[in-house]
Image: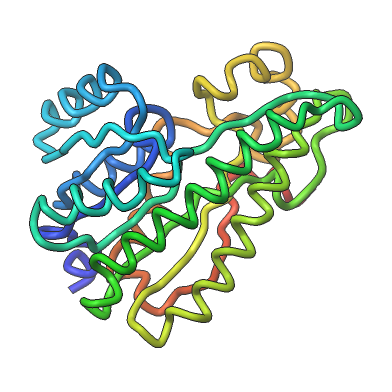
Amino acid sequence: MLRALFDLSGRVAVISGGSRGLGLQIAEALGEFGATVALVARKAEELEAAVDHLADQNIRAAPIVADLADPAAAELVAARAFALAGRIDVLVNNAGTAWGAPSESHPLSAWRKVIDLNLTGTFLLTQAVGRAAMLPAGAGRILNIASIEAMRGRPVGMPGTLAYATSKGGMISFTRSLAAEWGSRGITVNAIAPGFFPSKMTHGTLERFGAEIAARAPLGRLGGPHDLKGAALLFASDAGAYITGQVLAVDGGATVV
């Protein structure tokens, strides 16, 4: 019975930003438990590499090339993902970008770039998937990837990331508001707030501050290649059917000290 609660066989999961980093880690988890994963990213070559990587693990994956900062992309992604099997059961909103700059000199263009992808792109893709698949089916799991920077200020001495933190704070409000609205329609909406994980986005920061960041966390390390998998599987599966509107920090305890 317990294993059946985590089983995703026959289900389709759309994962934005799924070609590498946290998105690919989540794709591994959902695919291992039976889901077909539709990976969404801008770069075709990275998507093909991710699909091949997952195929080596006997995970069914399909690439969808799209830039979710483009408002026209969401409907296209939803339609292509729905065409895979006539359903979309799980949506993981992971695609995002960041910009480091002092707040007093943060460029407006960079602010808009971050907000357009991290928040507006999430809204449009969620809306499109909801209309195409989840609302007609009366069922679905939505998992938003926020950040511990939505819960606290940037550590003193590190470059400012005001737009990124603001967008991730908005992601948490988005999660709670949508959970309240769509719960009666069979859809759960939750968020994971990761701490620092090695990735292309965090490379520069961790190169300079990685040892310090790890030392500040009670568990004394950065996030690893499997550390998001359990939480993602819980929220995406029937095991999390009675959980909605929640935000889980996966951060080695960094937000409790």
Residue 23 image position (x, y, % from top left)? 38, 38
Q: Residue furthest front?
A: 72
Q: Position of residue 231 (x, y in %)?
A: 42, 54
Which residue occupies the foreground of this view, 59 or 239? Answer: 59
**On the picture, is 104 further left or further right than 227?**
right
Residue 24 appears in the figure: no
Q: Is residue 174 visible?
A: yes
User: Which percent across, then down, holds residue 185?
Assistant: 35, 84
Picture coordinates of residue 228, whole percent (x, y) = 44, 44
Left or right of 158 on screen, residue 143: left
Q: Given the current orientation, which residue lies at the most extreme bottom position?
A: 184
Q: Give the residue drawn at x 68%, y 39%.
A: 164
Q: Quadrant of the N terminus?
A: bottom left
Q: Residue at x 51, y 58 (%)?
A: 191
The residue lying toward the viewer, choosing from 179 and 76, is 76
Where 136 falls versus 234 (above or below)? below
Image quarter of residue 220: top right
Q: How many marks?
A: 0
Q: For residue 82, what is the image quadrant? A: bottom left
Q: Residue at x 52, y 53 (%)?
A: 192
The residue nearer to you, when weighing 7 against 16, is: 16
